[in-house]
Image: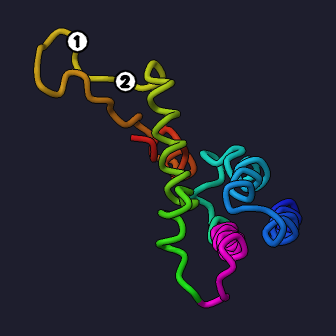
Amino acid sequence: MSRLSSACYAIRILTPIMTEDTVKMSYYAYVHSIIAYGIIFWGDSPHSDCIFKIQKWIIRIMTKLRRRDSCRQLFKRLEILPLKSQYILATLMFVVKNKELFTSGNSYINTRCNTDLHLPLCKLMVFQKGVYYTGL
């Protein structure tokens, strides 16, 4: 959280003196790299709400909006993914890159669902909230 606060301060300093494209590049270099690091492990935690609020705060600073203005259109205009969308994308990328870790359909019967990936069998909630379960 402290890294994001310092990133927010850096964006606040850069916004008045640079163009929007340059501020956007510094956002990706500084803020996005902090948010994206290990997001598949912490992206679904209760702390992600606080991080999403900081992300919206930084977007408002970048576009010089007030505190109560909506950020929904700003995310689209700046082409920046919100935190939840980043988490979903990172989880799906993990599944695509690591297909061999998951079980697929029956290889001896040729059906429509032959290539579908199946959830691993587990009763522990810790495992069910992990990337292997949520990715599928």
Picture layout, residue 48 above or below residue 134: below
Q: Which quadrant would residue 69 be assigned to in this image?
A: bottom right
Is residue 1 in view?
Answer: no
Residue 110 picture location, percent across and down: 11, 14
Q: From the viewer's perspective, tell me whether residue 116 is left or right of residue 66.
A: left
Q: Which quadrant would residue 65 be assigned to in this image?
A: bottom right
SS assignment for the magenta stretch, majority: helix
Q: Residue at x 86, y 60 (%)?
A: 3
In the rendered structure, does residue 52 fall within the stretch colored magenta?
A: yes
Q: Amino acid at mark 1?
A: Ser
Look at the numbered disc 2 and give the secondary structure of its residue.
strand
Crowding around mark 2 (Cα neighbors within 10 Å: few <14, some 14 to 19, many 20+) is few
According to the picture, the residue beneath numbered tag 2 turns out to be 103
**Camera-side residue of 96 and 76:** 76
Residue 54 picture location, percent across and down: 71, 71
- Residue occupying the far top of the picture: 108
Crowding around mark 1 (Cα neighbors within 10 Å: few <14, some 14 to 19, many 20+) is few
Q: Residue at x 77, y 53 (%)?
A: 26
According to the picture, the residue beneath numbered tag 1 turns out to be 107
Picture layout, residue 69 above or below residue 32: below
